[in-house]
Amino acid sequence: MDLLLFLVLSALILSLAYRLVGRRLADLFSLSDTEDTPAHQLRDGLDYEPARASYLLPQHFSAIAAAGPIVGPILAGLYFGWGPAWLWVILGSILIGGIHDFTALVASVRHRARSIAQVVREYMNPRAHLLFLVFIWFALVYVIIAFTDVTAGTFVAPPSDSGADAPGPAVATSSALYLGLAVLMGLALRHTSLGPVRAKLIFLPLVFVAIVVGPYLPIDLGALLPGANLQVVWGYLLLAYCFAAALSPVWALLQPRGELGGYFLYIVMAAGVLGIAVGAFAGDLHIAQPFFKGWEATDSFGNAAPLFPILFITVACGACSGFHSVVASGTTSKQLRRERDARAVGYGSMLLEAFFACLSLATLMILAQPGGGPSAIYAKGIATFANHALSPLLPAGVDARALLYQFALLCFATFVFDTLDACTRLARYVLMELLGWASRAQAVLATALTLVLPALALAIPRVEFAGKPLPLWQVFWGIFGSSNQLLAALTLLGITVWLARQGKPYWLALGPTLFMMAMTLWSLLLSIGPYLSLWQGGGAIDPLRHFQFAITVSLVGLTLWLIAEALITWRTLRPPQERAAPVLA
């Protein structure tokens, strides 16, 4: 298959799905056009604040995407070939991930923007509600652990093959400037007559200025802290940022940064698509990776990784993600201006993320011998595509890949930044709900408690494999993928019970529930085997492996308990006319 045909076919399938499946979902749930949503009913200027779909969609998209649609598809492509990864991205996003995101958002809006855990409490029982909250909180903590290390690694990345000078410190500078611009934009929109259109026209170009400035003012922590582990230092600085950002009003950082990041990423996708088109027509871009590599791969620890189920927990956010339901029912439902916007914001953003996953997969497909981690593969590919797009505008012989490589790394960091602070804010919501806290002081304490485990994880010595220390994100990626997909399955399980209680077609969520539950539990049970073999052999076991085992067992236990609670609830379902529960439409 030609690379351009691959991308065009992906876009056509996803567009058709949005038109047909998205419209069917909107009709099935009788979405309203009136502005009678929790964002208006409970407006407080802190968390509840109505936003137009054009403002909310890029914010939601940048919050849910993170590094998932970059790291997951690239890893899956390296393991099994680009074909299996692509098929799961397309089919999973349309039939499972999009339905999961949309139903989670609508369910939350129909229940006063309450979390999915609270919806579970209403339709199941208080015990299931508490279990679900614990599961969500741990899943969010895993996201923070994995993505903090991913971003920190980007800030200490060595110079690229294209000749960029110290891209890590340069990207750190550009990222800091980007966050500063988001705060300034939020203040300008809040306290001046500057409208959203003019704000974008001013601040989006300034983001590109920040990229250009980065190499000239690199934040080089190595000069300040000689001999220190800079990746760990950056990890702690990022956690400090998460603490402050999670406690700020949504208008001050979350909304403007989300919109800036979303439009910035739209531009990245457009540049990538245009570059692929130009390069394909010029005959310079070809698919160099095999469609299918085999039914089994080897993971980071040298263990066997069969395509079923590992593919489905490796791709993660590019096809389905439980984290999306937490965002949808945490921050997005509190800002949805009207129910009709749920089709674009909920279902549409998942398909948009799937297309971004296809673009990420294309960065791997052009490399005959991929080198470096997923962030480096992605940055090199995007730089190559964008260089093709700009080549007609540049003087003969000028190669812009050095600057574009940094541009792509900032794009990568932007995704993760947008998720890190949103994730910390959501974890704060969940922990406060779990403990029954409501005051501002308790919000500060809940945020601090959320960041304790990520801080401890940074302090644990890295696992070595084949004589080289593994990045923390790579150690936790399997756990992140499994917990994330399990959260999606459990969310769909709660949605299934909700729909059944309303006498609605619950099969819409039940099928995806069973598939995701089977794949994720299977993957978790597979991961326990190598640990037990080491333990029985009496060999030395790294502390991180103990940590992994404890997390895995706790995930399996919580899941089986929640399934049991759902089955108990299912047996006691009464016809909808016998209850005075909120109706679906």
Image (cartoon, rainbow, N blue to C red):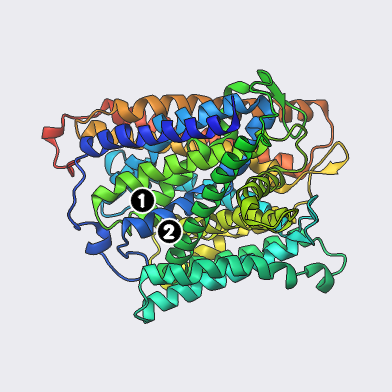
The disc label shown at residue 115, or none: 1
Give the left or right position of residue 413, taking residue 510 as reference. Answer: right
Give the left or right position of residue 85, taking residue 573 as reference. Answer: right
- Front residue of 323 and 89: 89
The disc label shown at residue 429, or none: 2
- Under tag 1, what secondary structure? loop
Q: Residue at 45% x, 64% y: name it.
A: 254
- Which amino acid is tagged 1? Ser
Residue 132 in sight: no
Residue occupying the far top of the picture: 295
- Which amino acid is tagged 2? Tyr
Near mark 2 (Cα within 10 A), the count class, few <14, some 14-19 or many ≥20, is many
**x, y percentage for residue 408?**
64, 53
**x, y percentage for residue 211?**
64, 65
Residue 115 in sight: yes
In the displayed structure, 186 sits above or below 135; it is below
Q: Which quarter of the rendering shows the C terminus?
A: top left
Count every numbered label the image shows and give the total.
Answer: 2
Residue occupying the far bottom of the picture: 192
Q: Earlier in the sequence, mark 1 or mark 2?
A: 1
The answer to which image quadrant residue 479 occupies is: top right
Say if mark 1 contacts mark 2, CB within 8 Å: yes
